[in-house]
Image (spheres, helix red, strand yellow):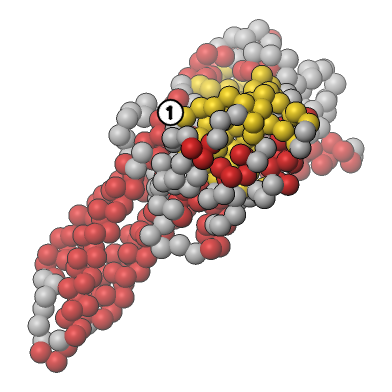
Amino acid sequence: MNDTIVALATAQGVSAIAVIRLSGKDCIDIVQKVFKGKNLQQQPSHTLHFGTIYDDKKVIDEVLVSLFKEPNSFTKENCIEISCHGSPVIIKEIIKVLLKKGARLAEPGEFTKRAFLNGRFDLAQAEAVADLINAETDNARQAALNQMRGGFSKEINRLREELIHFASLIELELDFGEEDVEFAKRDDLRYLILKIQTYLQSLIDSFDQGNVIKNGVPTVIAGKPNAGKSTLLNTLLNEERAIVSDIAGTTRDVIEDEVILGGINFRFIDTAGLRETQDVIEAIGVERTKERMKKASLIIYLFDLTQASLSEIEEQEKELVSLSIPFIKVGNKMDKADKSLLSKLEEKNFLFISAANKTNIQQLKEKILSYFQVQSVKTGDVMVTNIRHYQNLLQTNEALQRVLDGMDQEITGDFLAMDIRQALHYLGEITGTITTDDLLDNIFSKFCIGK
């Protein structure tokens, strides 16, 4: 925490400008050693300064320096952002000269980690920073922004405070154990826990929608060879992403890309055709298809209506049901199919399309969306999008249920206090009131280096 850290804050590669970020008590002194312009130590916070970066007598680049003095910065430390031309050579040279003058390279997420450790925001808000950067839809952006602004944290902290009040009263009872006094009225405690559980359950229930908004929906397009899977992927993406051929087994590996439908990011995954094969490479592709199907949130199973028989379709349908994953039965090549087969399949909840002619593709998109009803996220909406938060909420709810069960069994206050402390612990882990180094390392290691 005493080091001055430096990292590129903008994306790698050639660009018009790049931003190099520093944070730490000595960052102004370090930059001043290589900066020719105004004396940065004498300038007020939140000011911009034009000048030149030198390495001894060699000019590296003309830059614009943004100055933020503690505690009025993102990390609550002295911070500087150097805007330079976006040549990789220039970026490398500037960072190299800053390292030579005493800075060190930042670790992944270290700027945000320092902001958390210095009290700029809590852990849930810090995690929302990464979610905001990675948001791919407007709903994901709004959900992350709501969390970063502290709406979720305020609710969690309010619940903790109410529980802490009762926990302290029960702890006080333990000090007067021989006098048989009751500072925490059990009816009031029961009412509070039921109220908290009701709210916790609403947060837990919001995770299904929140997870879809944040992470999107992995959707596998599966079926036998030549069913039209690659053609359907290209049609959904509106580009020639996958190779289309009449030769069975053309797709041997997973091909995937993303499309936003109804504000949800769908990752469509084209897979190798499912069949028995002696080709070693194709067999690996078939195995990968089966693995992807098990991990999918939705399966679009394509049947070739010109080749498949009714008995074969029914057999494949049984295998789909055994996976216990939502699936859509899609009959492809409807324009070439036998009319008697179509009439028999109409009663089996089939959707008929022609991927090549783009027939009924809009109906397929509507069918896909019907499995994931996501409303627009509005400013102030509280929603759980993080699996870590979701697990902590489940554990909190279980601990509170043990308190209720304990009161029904009339157990002593020390056991009630133990379960309440457990609930407080799980709630505290969400916002970072209670943390471990392992937890922090795991969270911030997933951030990009300059954030």
Comparing 71 with 8, the one in front is 71
Comparing 435 with 79, the one in front is 79
**Which residue occupies 15% across, 60% down?**
191
Image coordinates of residue 433 in percent, x first then y, are 38, 60
Please identify the quadrant where the C terminus is shown. top right
**Badge 1 element:** helix
For the image, the number of numbered tags is 1
**Which residue occupies 37% across, 65% down?**
425
**Which residue occupies 32% across, 70% down?**
421
Image quarter of residue 27: top right
Name the side, left or right, on which 117 lies relative to 332.
Answer: left
Whether residue 166 is visible, yes or no, is yes
**Which residue occupies 83% across, 28% down?**
249
Name the side, left or right, on which 349 lies relative to 199.
Answer: right
Name the outermost residue toward the bottom: 178
Whether 289 is drawn above or below 243: the answer is below
Name the side, left or right, on which 193 lies relative to 300.
Answer: left
Name the outermost residue toward the right: 279
Comparing 27 with 230, the one in front is 27
Callout 1 environment at 10 Å: few (<14), some (14 to 19), or many (20+)?
many
- Find disc 1 in the rendering and name its residue: 139
Please identify the quadrant where the N terminus is shown. bottom right
Image coordinates of residue 131 in percent, x first then y, are 50, 38
Whether 56 is drawn above or below 114: the answer is above
Whether residue 216 is visible, yes or no, is no
Image coordinates of residue 242 in percent, x first then y, are 75, 21
Whether 442 is drawn above or below 295: the answer is below
Image quarter of residue 205: top left
Comparing 175 with 6, the one in front is 6
**Three-letter code, disc 1:** Asn
